[in-house]
Amino acid sequence: MKKVKITVLKKNFDKELAAEYGVEGLTACPMLKEGQVFYADYAKPEGLCDEAWKAIYQYVFALSHGAGNELFYYGDWIRKPGVAICSCNDGLRPVIFKLEATDEESKIDYEPIK
């Protein structure tokens, strides 16, 4: 299993939808910053939003297990092997992530419960 680099590419904010459905004072995602980088494999990296992780973990898992050697979805999505562009599931203020396969080996950095 390899580590996957997760980069926050862009934070979006849909003013129209937020005005209609959002709470007063809603802004773009306050948890993440553009350019922020995380590394992941089998577990959510510390500091990454739980909801974002739920939206992207399957791509992280696939890339960490070698899906990066080929293109996703028969080559009709991303043109670069080992890369996925994903977003969190917040419809008012989605965050866009770039996931990249790396050559860095994963290792368990905690004591498993027996």
Image: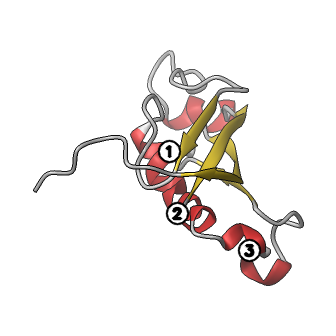
Give the residue pinned by disc 2: 61
Disc 1 residue type (three-letter) = Ala
Q: Is residue 42 visible?
A: yes
Element type where label 1 sits in the image: helix
Location of residue 92 (image quadrant): top right
Q: Position of residue 18 (x, y in %)?
A: 57, 32
The residue at 57%/26% (across/down) is 32
C-alpha separation, residue under disc 2 versus residue under disc 1: 14 Å
Q: Of the residues under marks 2 and 3, which one precedes in the sequence?
A: 2
State the residue position of label 1. Answer: 52
Residue at 89%, 67% (x, y): give it. Answer: 79
Where is mark 3, residue-wise? 72
Task: Residue at 23%, 44% (x, y): give it.
Answer: 111
Question: Which of marks 1 and 2 precedes in the sequence?
Answer: 1
From the viewer's perspective, tell me whether residue 3 is left or right of residue 67.
left
Q: Measure the C-alpha gap from mark 2 to mark 3.
A: 13 Å
Tag nearer the camera, 2 or 3: 2
Instruction: Identify the image's colour scheme: rainbow, by chain, secondary structure or one colour.
Output: secondary structure
